[in-house]
Amino acid sequence: MNRVKIKDKTFEVSMQEAEIKARVKELAQEMSRDLEGKNPLLLAVLNGSFIFAADLMREMTIPCEISFVKLASYQGTTSTGTVHEVIGINEDLTGRTVVIVEDIVDTGRTMRQMVEQLGTRNPASVQICTLFFKPTKLKEDLKLDYVAFSIPDDFILGYGLDYDQQARGLKDVYSLVSEKNMKNIVIFGAPGSGKGTQSEKLIEKYGLEHISTGDVLRSEIKKGTELGKTAQQYIDQGQLIPDELMVSILASVYDSFGREHKGVIFDGFPRTIPQAVALKQMLDERGDKVAAMLELDVPEDELMKRLILRGQQSGRADDNEETIRKRLVVYHSQTQPLIEWYKQEGLHYHIDGLGELDRIFADISAVIDNI
């Protein structure tokens, strides 16, 4: 899996297990050459270094011992800057070659304090071995004797490292996916509410992408994609396209926009609560989310006037009063439970869709600008 969700954050693979283990083996061989005949004491810093220390010791080709000390300097994804010793050092270090084994060194404050404490116990030498090093974060005058990887200033987890005590057991190392100000919008509006016009204005002003389920289905079928062929089979049999297939199609289109898009307007989907849940899960797997659900609310008598006028102008056979009323009944029966669901999610925004076009768009823009 390239991405994982841990609590409220998303992480993606930045270093695979095979690369880590190969480098740990190289480091162990280097240390074995340098420290031969010295029976070094590996002093592993808990909790994060326990996997690294174990793998390192197994690859050592000289006699060595291991002990542990527990220090805490992280809370969440940032360093507190304060080090607290939880488990002390009980070994006699007089004349010993001590190698501190740490999972990650950034500011160096933890290491500096440890080196100072160990120096009072008369060791022959104190050396530092770290799996990861963030050179741009270093604040202390500190010599690192063995460094497996120098990395950017990203928050990472896996291979012993955690986020609030979670995910230490992941075999690969994952980096935090930076949270983008992505404006994924679900737009609701009955036929004749002006949803299409407002979507066009949103695309122009905010540079958003647009996914209309009808357009997407027609496009996938026309291109002859596997998803499109599967959808066509359901249509040919007069069956509704399953939610799972529809979400797969939407996910394919969504992914085609790349990771740098500014957001997507979802038009015509979701129509039911299960579809909304499926959309939420699809976006969640990508570290994204729906930022707002906009409900364009227009009184039914106004909708009737607009649609009848549209029918007269376009000649559309389905824009007659009887058909329009049926469509509105279906729309309201489908969307009302979904509107309540989005209200519970804290994402529902009511937009008065009656009045001047520019005023309506100004109300929508005010919502988008404050997300």
Image: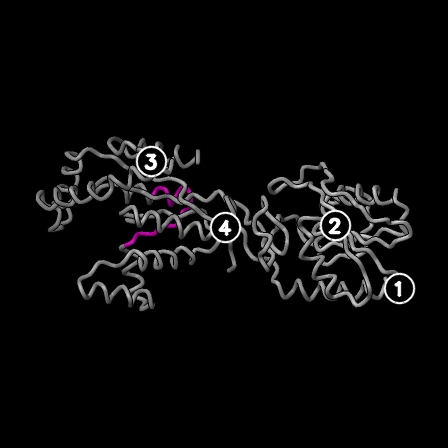
| Disc number lying in front (2 or 4) | 2
Give the percent coordinates (x, y) of residue 132: 70, 54
Instruction: Determine the image quadrant of residue 41.
Output: bottom right
Give the percent coordinates (x, y) of residue 269: 30, 49
Neighbourhood count class around disc 2 (C-alpha, 10 Å): few under 14, some 14–19, many 20 upward: many
Q: Secondary structure at mark 2?
A: strand
Label 3 sits on residue: 343
Q: Residue at x 72, y 36 (%)?
A: 82
Which callout, 2 or 4, points at the residue further toward the start of the chain?
Answer: 4
Which callout, 2 or 3, points at the residue further toward the start of the chain?
Answer: 2
Q: CA distance from mark 1 to mark 2?
A: 22 Å
290 lies above or below 225: above
Which callout, 4 or 3, points at the residue further toward the start of the chain?
Answer: 4
Label 4 sits on residue: 5
Foreground pick, 261 / 16 = 16
Label 2 sits on residue: 68
Q: Which residues are magenta?
A: 201-213
124 lies above or below 343: below
Question: Left or right: 9 with respect to 160?
Answer: left
| Disc number lying in front (3 or 1) | 1
Query: Which amino acid, mark 2?
Result: Phe
Circles 1 and 2, Cβ within 8 Å, touching? The answer is no
Which callout, 3 or 1, points at the residue further toward the start of the chain?
Answer: 1
Which callout, 1 or 2, points at the residue further toward the start of the chain?
Answer: 1
Give the percent coordinates (x, y) of residue 250: 35, 56
Q: Secondary structure at mark 3?
A: helix
Neighbourhood count class around disc 4 (C-alpha, 10 Å): few under 14, some 14–19, many 20 upward: some
Q: Secondary structure at mark 1?
A: loop
Label 1 sits on residue: 37
Q: Residue at x 12, y 50 (%)?
A: 318
